[in-house]
Amino acid sequence: MKKFTIILLSMATAFSCLRPDPGTDPVLQHVPPLDSVGGIRVSADTADMEPSVRNFRGQALLNRDMTSLSWFVSAPYSGGYHTGTLRINGETPRVSMFRWLPSRAVREGETDRWKIRSIVKMVPDEDAVMWDVRITNEADTARDLELELDLIGFVSKYGGDWQWWYPYPKLDGQTT
């Protein structure tokens, strides 16, 4: 009986390890990469709503500047207002294009010949938001750049049950 169990276990392991190469499996050849299933680039002046990012714990809504969020929630944390407005040489650049993808949202803009690309994503299964901001000098000469990041957003931790309406912080306290 012991020999029979070992043989069955060996056969099961061997068969479970035999997978077709993704490059040759006809089904997998028709599954597009994540970058290709995202939305097209949309002009910010025609977008009714800003994109949002999500993970399996929460979500965040982007603003029309290059870096801030208008609110986010990832229980037990909730936050509001503009959480990190980027300023370049004292000016807040505005988004000219949005693009939403399953794993992130992209914002593009330009100010005074500085090209800006900002990517925001929520870390899977974590209470975290990540930014990747790239600024390129489009001028013909080298020049100085003064960066500021205004961090006035509120973040609070709330206990209890979170139903459809979740708690979020305001100047005068918690709102649900």
Image: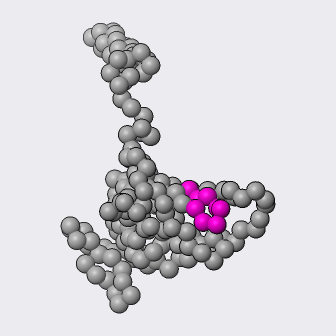
Residue at 24% of width from left, 68% of height from top? 162
Residue at 65% of width from left, 62% of height from top? 113
Q: Nearer the viewer, residue 19 or 138?
A: 138
Indicate whether 60 appears above or below 158: above
Q: Nearer the viewer, residue 19 or 110?
A: 110
Outermost residue, bottom side: 172
Residue at 44% of width from left, 40% of height from top? 35
Please tell me whether the stretch drawn in magenta is mainly helix, strand or loop.
strand
Bounds of the magenta segment: 110-117
Q: Quadrant of residue 127?
A: bottom left
Quarter that holds the C terminus:
bottom left
Q: Position of residue 169 (x, y in %)?
A: 36, 80
Outermost residue, right side: 142
The count of marks equals: 0
Quarter that holds the N terminus:
top left
**Residue 6 visible somewhere in the drawing:** no
Residue 162 horizontal side relative to residue 139, left or right: left
**Residue 109 visible somewhere in the drawing:** yes
Is residue 17 magenta-colored?
no
Q: Position of residue 19 (x, y in %)?
A: 39, 18
Residue 56 horizontal side relative to residue 146, left or right: left
Indicate whether 35 appears above or below 44: above
Q: Position of residue 56 (x, y in %)?
A: 34, 53
Q: Nearer the viewer, residue 136 or 151?
A: 136
Residue at 44% of width from left, 19% of height from top? 23
